[in-house]
Image (spheres, rainbow, N blue to C red):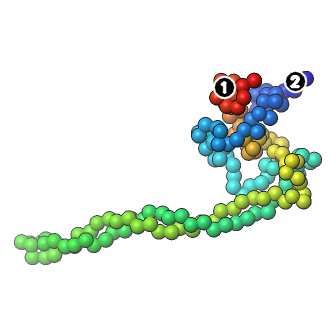
Amino acid sequence: MLCFVNVTGHEFTEEQLQFVANLNLQDLPRELQIRIKKTTRMGDNSHWCCRNDLDTTVNFTTITKTEMVFMKQSVQVKVGSQSCGFFGTSKCETYDIRYVEQPVYHITTQLIPNHNICEDRMLVCCNHFLMIAKTCMHKDDAKDMVDVLLKLQGAGLLGKKK
């Protein structure tokens, strides 16, 4: 029995949606990886629900880490002087721009589901969200991506061709 699911005006079978949900992010074309990462909001877990109650969001524990990255910064430095003014009676300083790396600290957060509330196998995307490459995306953001992924599969460029 074929079951069709309507996703923002497009109809897909459960098998097609399952295929798209289980893709590995690193197997996708780079531009699709970027689109998926951009639509994922860090620190927002409102799109994950427990299968036994699709309207109840799953509680997560937030782990916060401090990371350091080096950023290049321009600095104006005095490199010498030269004669200037009326008949070279004055001295003018000459400057150059040099670049130094400064450490910059920022905070990253990671969400870990509370296992005592919902088991991993019961985690699903909430209503109005669709799983693509193990990431829940709002149906409005995912509507064209599913078509592209299924076309890549049909062309034998992604997953097993059926």
Camera-side residue: 57 or 131?
131
Camera-side residue: 97 or 155?
155
Snapshot quadrant of residue 110: bottom right
Q: Secondary structure at mark 1?
A: loop
**Residue holding disc 1:** 156
Q: Is residue 11 above or below residue 142?
A: above
Q: Secondary structure at mark 2?
A: loop
Snapshot quadrant of residue 43: bottom right
Residue shown at 88%/48% (left/top)?
A: 122
Task: Please say if the residues under marks 1 and 2 sit with CB atoms less than 8 Å apart.
Answer: no
Cα distance in 3D space between marks 1 and 2: 23 Å
Residue shown at 87%/26% (left/top)?
A: 3
Q: How far from the left and from the top, in percent, is residue 68? A: 56, 66
Residue shown at 65%/24% (left/top)?
A: 155
Q: How far from the left and from the top, in percent, is residue 71? A: 48, 63
Residue shown at 79%/49% (left/top)?
A: 47
Q: Is residue 145 above or below residue 58?
A: above
Q: In the picture, which quadrant includes the C terminus?
A: top right
Q: Is residue 162 above or below residue 123?
A: above
Left or right, 83 with respect to 120, comes to left
**Residue holding disc 2:** 2
Residue 140 visible here: no
Q: How far from the left and from the top, in percent, is residue 101? A: 44, 66
* Callout 1 amino acid: Gly
* Callout 2 amino acid: Leu
Residue 40 visible here: yes
